Image: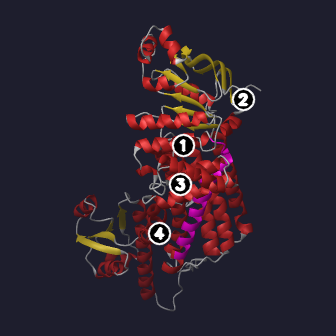
């Protein structure tokens, strides 16, 4: 116990004296939590629309002004021909072309049927998909209005299905509510993962680990002496993040804080075990940095923060399930937004527990006092 | 139970088909200053790492402080001090904090740490620097401090791997005063060096060439044996026969 206390004392002194490390641990994540949710916006606005109007009628005028006033589209130009509109897309000045054929109004009035043509630049898939969908909705609305005007009240109206939505747990579809808890998980992961991976390798690099290896310090003492300080830092970072979420974004966890911290406690052990494992296989900080970066990149992309895990193909889902971050982001969203209880997150908890045991076991096994 | 500090018989370390240490045998008496010489790449550090329990030998037998280097590495570690080629105190801790950490790890009580620490700081004349970060000290001071910390728990044997590399002659002289002092208190000193004047200070020396020990005796006997006037000549005579290229 005394040895462990000495190790902790030494580790905390070193951390708090490292003027370069402190801002990385405490200031940088909080800055990111302030900035990133503002930028990570999934709403698609400012879609540039090029209109090819071959009809020039009252209806086309009405239709275009309806689109322009929706707030999602920005009409960049009116053309009478397709070619200049296409050039606009090629120059990245427009995202979507709306082509209205000649005789649109005549067809609509006489034949009771008219069509328009929409072409989207799918280089930005989200913009193209959502933009076309918005455009479709606006045109359908417009269509319904015209029909209402024309059909006499007494006449039988064709049956339509009205769909009404209600968004549970996030009624206003506020994306920040959804992103902030996830981003907080990422930040804790980055800080914890990197400093744990780099710290032991640093001792290897400067040679102090050899001095430790030649003392009677036990393996478990040395590893705990490394784990505990970073575990505490992870807890502090998470707490700062929760406070920031509360006071800046007004996000108050619906579920139990105890449950959140309980899960975090296990998650941090798993994460630090991962950092430790990397450090036992690396000879210098550069190597450890690259390896840690590679894995944390995978963790981030597969975590379900940006892309829903449910939509992934089966093999990708398996990878996602094998990354500790995925489960924690899941649990954060469930507990913070939905108020889930332990029974709801049992599976994730078991996954995390398994990661903690396997990663740390592996790291301890691979760390040798005698080579 | 033997009273030898170190015994070594056919100790070997092989990396694939390369014999870093090739069947070396020797004994070191308790309280002796034993010089371990050899060119770069001759296998000195590898041999020393095996004796300290940092590396598993491939074959042979050896005991350090009476403990087996194959099985009782952790017992050995309680009874030795070690100072590596690389400076290995913590640079972002003060002189006092380093003493406290390393002394404490060897099981010294707070009271002992205070006494030993005071004594050590006074002996090195570092009262002014006790609260300074070790990283800001000049190299010679660092090396003297590292040595003093390595023997703070009064080990039976201290292993020194080129402790005076890059240190000025005056400080080297002071360093050897510290070594003599430790030997007088009964600590066996096992030291590697490239300075032949330092070799003369040892009770006995061994010279390694290509993983083998080619000569082992007192400095005076070795000079006589090789018909040389100085240890320098003895060393040249042996090292010239080396096949391995120095690193």
**Disc 4 versus disc 2: distance between alpha carbons?**
56 Å
Q: Is residue A98 left or right of residue B197?
A: left
SS category of the residue bearing label 3: helix
In the image shown, does A166 or A265 lie closer to the viewer? Answer: A265
Q: Quadrant of residue A328?
A: bottom right
**Disc 3 versus disc 1: distance between alpha carbons?**
12 Å
Residue A4 seen from this side:
no
Q: In the image, are marks 4 and 1 on the same chain?
A: no
Q: Earlier in the sequence, mark 2 or mark 1?
A: 2
- Residue A182 in magenta stretch: no
* In the image, residue A279 above or below residue A269: above
What's the chain of the residue with tag 1? B
**Crowd rating for badge 2 (residues with CA inside 10 Å; few <14, some 14–19, many 20+):** some
What's the chain of the residue with tag 3? B
Residue A138 seen from this side:
yes
Residue receiving disc 4: A30
SS category of the residue bearing label 2: loop
Q: Residue at x 74, y 67 (%)?
A: A343
Residue A318 on image: x %, y %: 62, 50
Q: Which residues are magenta?
A: A215-243
**Crowd rating for badge 1 (residues with CA inside 10 Å; few <14, some 14–19, many 20+):** many
What's the chain of the residue with tag 4? A
**Disc 3 versus disc 4: distance between alpha carbons?**
36 Å
**Crowd rating for badge 4 (residues with CA inside 10 Å; few <14, some 14–19, many 20+):** many
* In the image, residue A132 above or below residue B175: below
């Amino acid at each position: 116990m005394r040895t462990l206390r000495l190790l902790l004392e030494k580790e905390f002194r070193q951390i708090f004296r490292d003027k370069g490390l402190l801002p990385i641990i405490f200031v940088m994540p909080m800055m990111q939590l302030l900035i990133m949710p503002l930028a990570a916006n999934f709403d698609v606005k400012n879609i540039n629309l090029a209109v090819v109007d071959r009809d020039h009628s009252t209806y086309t005028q009405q239709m275009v002004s309806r689109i322009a006033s929706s707030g999602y589209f920005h009409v960049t130009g009116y053309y009478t021909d397709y070619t200049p509109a296409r050039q606009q897309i090629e120059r990245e000045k427009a995202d979507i072309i709306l082509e209205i054929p000649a005789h649109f109004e005549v067809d609509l009035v006489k034949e009771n049927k008219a069509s328009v043509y929409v072409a989207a630049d799918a280089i930005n898939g989200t913009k193209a998909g959502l933009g076309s969908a918005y455009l479709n909705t606006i045109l359908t609305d417009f269509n319904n209005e015209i029909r209402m005007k024309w059909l006499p009240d007494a006449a039988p109206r064709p049956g339509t299905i009205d769909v009404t939505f209600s968004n549970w747990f996030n009624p206003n579809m506020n994306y920040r509510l959804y992103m902030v808890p996830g981003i907080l998980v990422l930040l804790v992961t980055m800080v914890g993962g990197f400093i744990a991976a780099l710290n032991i390798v640093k001792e290897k690099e400067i040679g102090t680990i050899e001095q430790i290896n030649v003392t009677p310090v036990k393996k478990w003492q040395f590893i705990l002496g490394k784990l505990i300080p970073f575990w505490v830092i992870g807890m502090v970072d998470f707490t700062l993040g929760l406070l920031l979420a509360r006071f800046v974004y007004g996000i108050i966890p619906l579920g139990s804080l105890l449950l959140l911290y309980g899960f975090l406690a296990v998650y941090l052990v798993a994460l630090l075990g991962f950092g430790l494992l990397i450090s036992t296989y690396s000879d210098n900080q550069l190597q450890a940095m690259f390896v840690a970066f590679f894995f944390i990149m995978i963790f981030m992309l597969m975590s379900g923060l940006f892309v829903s895990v449910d939509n992934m193909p089966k093999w990708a889902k398996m990878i996602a399930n094998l990354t500790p971050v995925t489960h924690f982001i899941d649990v954060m969203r469930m507990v913070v937004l939905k108020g889930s209880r332990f029974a709801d997150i049992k599976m994730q908890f078991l996954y995390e527990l398994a990661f903690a045991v396997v990663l740390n076991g592996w790291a301890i096994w691979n760390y040798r006092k005698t080579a | 139970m033997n009273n030898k500090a170190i015994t070594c018989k056919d100790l070997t370390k092989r990396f694939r088909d390369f014999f870093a240490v090739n069947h070396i045998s020797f004994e070191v008496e308790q309280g002796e200053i034993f010089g371990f010489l050899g060119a770069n790449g001759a296998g000195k550090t590898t041999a020393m790492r095996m004796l300290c329990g940092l590396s598993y030998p491939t074959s042979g037998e050896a005991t350090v402080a009476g403990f087996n280097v194959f099985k009782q590495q952790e017992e050995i570690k309680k009874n030795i001090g070690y100072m590596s080629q690389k400076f290995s105190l913590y640079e972002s801790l003060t002189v006092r904090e380093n003493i406290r950490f390393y002394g404490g790890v060897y099981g010294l009580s707070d009271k002992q740490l205070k006494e030993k620490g005071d004594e050590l700081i006074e002996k090195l004349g570092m009262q002014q620097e006790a609260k300074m970060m070790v990283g800001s000290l000049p190299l010679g001071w660092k090396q003297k401090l590292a040595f003093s910390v390595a023997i703070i728990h009064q080990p039976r044997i201290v292993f020194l791997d080129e402790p005076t590399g890059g240190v000025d002659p005056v400080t080297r002289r002071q360093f050897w005063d510290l070594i003599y002092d430790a030997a007088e208190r009964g600590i066996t000193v096992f030291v590697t060096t490239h300075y032949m004047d330092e070799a003369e200070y040892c009770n006995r020396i061994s010279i390694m060439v290509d993983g083998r020990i080619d000569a082992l005796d007192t400095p005076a006997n070795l000079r006589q044996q090789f018909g040389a006037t100085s240890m320098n000549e003895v060393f040249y005579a042996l090292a010239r026969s080396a096949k391995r290229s120095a690193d």
